[in-house]
Amino acid sequence: MKVMEETISGAIVRRFFNKLERHLSVDVAIVGAGPSGLVAAHDLALAGYNVAVFESKLAPGGGTWGGGMLMNEVVVQNDAAAILHEFNITTVPFDNQYQTVDAIEMASGLIFGARKAGAVIFNAVTVEDIAIHDGRVCGVVINWNPVARLGMHVDPIVIMCRALVDGTGHPSEIVQKAVNKAGVTIDSPTGGILGEKPMWMEDGERTTVENTKRLYPGLYASGMAANNVQGGFRMGPIFGGMFKSGRKIAQLISADLSHD
């Protein structure tokens, strides 16, 4: 008879590696479990796609937890609040245009919603490279984040995908790899990354959605990553554009994959 310790350890190891093996090849890989990535993961999983989200931090949720300057409330526009309500996240009217949201409820609600829709989140995992075959982005090269932070020489593994979303926020880390390492020309005014402009909330909210697009075969960007690529303004602790961006990229990917 196995001792309790062996049973518990065995359960963790077997269940995790079963989960990992089922996601060595996915329909959609999303890098970054921020607001746009989690909304996209939720929508795509509900549509029946096999979705894996890779988050380098231990806690998914992106930059939402701290609200504005560690005051854990954020703001959304009335129309964007409807997306949060689909996740059973509570919003409180502020005036005739905006509603406020408890940042902790929002982050945890988006995570839970994406997971219950069927998306799988791998946390503490960093994407150190991408795979490109025959002029199409088709995979991510992953490793444990602590391995990367410690500079350990440990080879990664590869997750193949039909579509890859850069949801890494301000740095656009995945698009950076495509442009700087692979030398691809993306769908932007210069064919490269323009970089984020200073704060202008209203315009930043608009362009976050407008800039959400397919950049190269198999490669997409959402949220602040999309804005950074196209040279949009930052917007701070207002999140409507992020939710709409996640929904838009899910619709674009679904349409593209349905024609593959």
Image (cartoon, grey):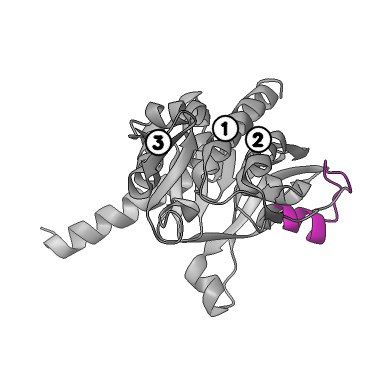
Q: Quadrant of the N terminus?
A: bottom left
Q: Which residue is mark 1?
A: 244
Above or below, 193 relative to 37: below
- Segment tinted magenta in the rendering: 175-190
Earlier sequence position, callout 2 versus callout 1: 2
At label 1, the amino acid type is Lys
Within 10 Å of the Cα at label 2, are there few (<14), some (14-19), or many (20+) other Cα atoms?
A: many
At label 3, the amino acid type is Phe
Q: Which residue is mark 2?
A: 209
Residue 70 placed where, x, y %?
40, 61
Query: Mark 3: which secondary structure?
Result: loop
Left or right: residue 44 compared with residue 260? left
At label 2, the amino acid type is Val
Residue 67 placed where, x, y %?
43, 53
Residue 245 placed where, x, y %?
60, 35
Which residue, as the protein is rendered here, is positioned at the far right? 190
* Of 29 and 227, the residue lying toward us: 227
Query: Mark 1: which secondary structure?
Result: helix
Q: Which residue is mark 3?
A: 94
As for residue 177 lying within the magenta part, the answer is yes
The residue located at (61%, 44%) in the rendering is 223
For the residues bearing labels 3 and 2, Cβ distance under 8 angstroms? no
Earlier sequence position, callout 3 versus callout 2: 3
Residue 104 placed where, x, y %?
34, 49
**Across the whole image, how many numbered discs are drawn on residues?**
3
For the residues bearing labels 2 and 1, Cβ distance under 8 angstroms? yes
